[in-house]
Image (tube, rainbow, N blue to C red):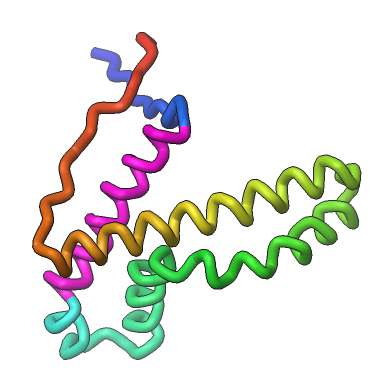
């Protein structure tokens, strides 16, 4: 028996936004559910800080968006054209802000006790 597994990326900005809302809700739920147990576990401080950073960084991703010019310059030094490097840098900048905004929306909904509903994305038949 053969099994094929795949994933489709969101097809539009609306679906990407809803996907990130779901992912941020999961990260926040993970922090709320496991933070206390994790902080008193036998894991090293390095592992604890790594876990905390991985689940909390998306909520502050936009704060790191000032690095996009550095990314663009690095891409140019690796051989990308100025236009291509600029486009990639701008995309990184916008995506980091999208992720941060989604994180803030999730935190706001959690504070206001509002449910986060799953919205079915548009899909193409595979």
Answer above or below: position of 94 versus 83: below
Residue furthest top as drawn? 125
Quarter of the picture holding the N terminus: top left
On the picture, is 7 further left or further right than 3? Answer: right
Q: Quadrant of the C terminus?
A: top left
Residue 21 picture location, percent across and down: 31, 49
Magenta stretch containing residue 94, yes or no? no
Is 42 positioned to the left or the right of 71 in the image? left
Segment colored magenta: 13-34
Instruction: Identify the residue at image location x=16%, y=42%.
Output: 117
Of 61 and 104, the residue lying toward us: 104
Residue at 23% of width from left, 56% of height from top?
Answer: 26
Q: Is residue 102 above or below residue 60?
A: above
In the image, residue 61 lies at what x, y percent?
Answer: 49, 66
Residue 20 against residue 50 in the figure, above or below = above
Residue drawn at (79%, 56%) of the image: 72
- Count of numbered badges drawn on the protein: 0
Query: Which of these two is toward me, 25 or 34?
Result: 25
Magenta-drawn stretch, dominant element (helix, strand or loop): helix
Kindly indicate the quadrant of the structure image that contains residue 122: top left
x and y percentages locating residue 19 in the rendered image: 34, 41
Examine the image and state in which quarter residue 111 appears: bottom left
Eyeballing the image, is 11 above or below 69?
above
Was residue 33 drawn as part of the magenta stretch in this picture?
yes
């Amino acid at each position: 028996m053969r099994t094929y597994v795949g994933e489709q990326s969101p097809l539009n900005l609306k679906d990407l936004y809803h996907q990130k809302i779901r992912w941020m809700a999961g990260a926040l739920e993970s922090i709320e559910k496991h933070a206390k147990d994790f902080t008193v576990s036998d894991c090293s401080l390095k592992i604890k800080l790594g876990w905390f950073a991985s689940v909390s960084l998306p909520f502050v991703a936009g704060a790191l968006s000032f690095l996009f010019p550095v990314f663009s310059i690095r891409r140019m030094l690796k051989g990308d054209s100025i236009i291509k490097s600029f486009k990639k840098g701008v995309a990184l900048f916008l995506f980091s802000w999208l992720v941060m905004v989604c994180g803030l929306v999730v935190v706001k909904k959690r504070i206001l006790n509002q449910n986060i509903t799953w919205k079915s994305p548009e899909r193409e038949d595979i």
